[in-house]
Image (cartoon, rainbow, N blue to C red):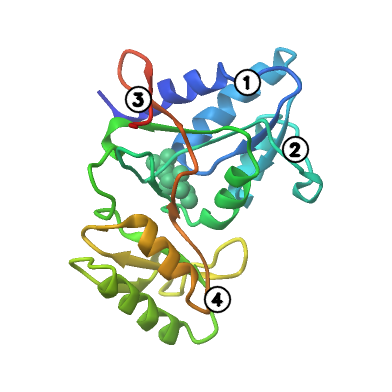
C-alpha cells in the first residue's frame, strides 16, 4: 500500500468534517495538499468556506483549486484547522516543520477551535525525536543561536545534539522560510521530555518558533489502504 493512498484517505475523512460557512486553517505538505484538492471539489459543488493558508505554497494550491481565502489579519477564531505532521506521539504531541512552514502552521492551529492532524501510520511514534526537529531562527548570528539550541538539546537529555542549517536543494544556500527566517534541523535521536524541550527552545533569543506542537490537538486521523480511522487521545 502506498503512503500516498493512506494520506488521501486521511484527507478525505477530514474533508467530511467541513461544514458550510466554516473558516478553515489549511496546512502544508503532501497530506494537506490532498485535503485542499478534495476541499476544492466540494467548493465547486457549492460548499461555502474560507481558508487561511499556512504557507505561500498552500496559498497557491488553494487558489489553483478554487478554495476562497481570507486575510489572516482579520481572523479571530477558525472553526477547524487541518494539517499533516512529521511525528505524532501517544499523547498527540507533534513534530512539524518538515516542509519549513511550522511558524504559520502553529499560528493557524492555535487560532482554531479544533485542530485535526491527518497522516498515514508511519508518523506514529512512541517517543518524538527520530525525525530531526525543525527550529525556525532569525538569520542574524545563526551560528550563536545554533550553539545555544545544541546546548538546550543536551540539557534536555537528548542522546544526540547535531544541529544543522537546512539548505535549499542543490543551491548550497540556506532554505528561507515564508517569514524570511532559516531553519535549524536538530538530530536529537529521541526527546525524553518534549514539553520541557519546547519551553527551553522558546526561551532562546533568536528562536522564532520550533516544531514541537505540545497539547495542540485531540484529533488525529490515520489513513490506510481501506479508509481512515480517527484516533482518541490517550488519557
Ligand atoms: C510542513 C509540515 C507537514 O505537515 C509535515 O512535514 C508532513 O508533511 P507530509 O504531509 O508531506 O508528510 O509540518 O511544515
* Residue denoted by label 3: 6
What x and y, as percent, mark residue 209? 52, 64
Sequence order check, earlier mark of 3 and 1: 3
Circle 4 — which element? loop
Location of the N terminus by quadrant is top left
Q: For the residues marked 3 and 2, what is the alpha-carbon distance in whole angstroms?
A: 27 Å
Location of the C terminus by quadrant is top left
Q: For the residues marked 4 and 2, what is the alpha-carbon distance in whole angstroms?
A: 28 Å
* Residue denoted by label 1: 18
Sequence order check, earlier mark of 3 and 4: 3
Circle 1 — which element? loop
185 with respect to 203 (left or right): left
Circle 2 — which element? loop
Judge whether 231 appears above or below 74 on screen. above
Q: Are marks 3 and 2 in contact (CB under 8 Å)?
A: no
Residue at 29 percent of width and 53 percent of height: 131
Q: For the residues marked 4 and 1, what is the alpha-carbon distance in whole angstroms?
A: 36 Å
79 with respect to 164 (left or right): right
* Residue denoted by label 2: 69
Q: For the residues marked 1 and 2, what is the alpha-carbon distance in whole angstroms?
A: 15 Å
Q: Are marks 3 and 4 in contact (CB under 8 Å)?
A: no
What x and y, as percent, mark residue 81? 59, 35
Quadrant of the displayed image that contains ligand 1: top left
* Residue denoted by label 4: 138
Sequence order check, earlier mark of 3 and 2: 3
Q: Residues within 10 Å of mark 3 (few under 14, many from 20)?
A: many
Q: Nearer the viewer, residue 140 or 67?
A: 140
Amino acid at each position: 500500500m502506498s503512503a500516498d493512498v493512506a494520506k488521501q484517505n486521511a484527507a478525505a475523512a477530514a474533508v467530511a468534517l467541513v461544514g458550510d460557512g466554516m473558516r478553515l486553517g489549511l496546512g502544508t505538505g503532501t497530506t494537506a495538499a490532498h485535503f485542499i484538492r478534495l476541499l476544492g471539489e466540494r467548493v465547486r459543488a457549492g460548499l461555502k468556506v474560507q481558508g487561511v493558508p499556512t504557507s505561500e505554497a498552500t496559498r497557491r494550491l488553494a487558489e489553483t483549486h478554487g478554495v476562497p481565502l481570507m486575510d489572516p489579519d482579520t481572523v479571530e477564531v477558525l472553526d477547524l484547522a487541518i494539517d499533516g505532521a512529521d511525528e505524532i506521539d501517544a499523547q498527540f504531541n507533534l513534530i512539524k516543520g518538515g516542509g519549513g512552514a511550522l511558524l504559520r502552521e502553529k499560528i493557524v492551529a492555535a487560532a482554531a477551535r479544533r485542530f485535526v492532524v491527518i497522516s498515514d501510520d508511519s508518523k506514529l511514534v512512541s517517543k518524538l525525536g527520530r525525525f530531526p526537529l525543525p527550529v525556525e531562527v532569525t538569520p542574524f548570528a545563526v551560528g550563536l543561536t545554533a550553539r545555544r539550541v545544541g546546548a538546550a538539546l543536551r540539557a534536555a537529555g537528548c542522546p544526540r545534539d547535531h544541529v544543522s542549517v537546512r539548505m535549499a536543494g542543490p543551491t548550497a544556500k540556506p532554505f528561507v522560510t515564508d517569514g524570511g527566517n532559516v531553519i535549524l534541523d536538530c538530530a536529537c535521536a529521541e526527546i525524553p521530555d518534549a514539553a520541557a524541550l519546547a519551553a527551553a527552545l522558546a526561551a532562546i533569543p533568536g528562536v522564532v518558533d520550533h516544531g514541537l506542537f505540545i497539547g495542540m490537538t485531540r484529533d488525529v486521523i490515520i489513513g490506510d489502504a481501506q479508509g481512515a480511522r480517527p484516533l482518541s487521545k490517550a488519557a
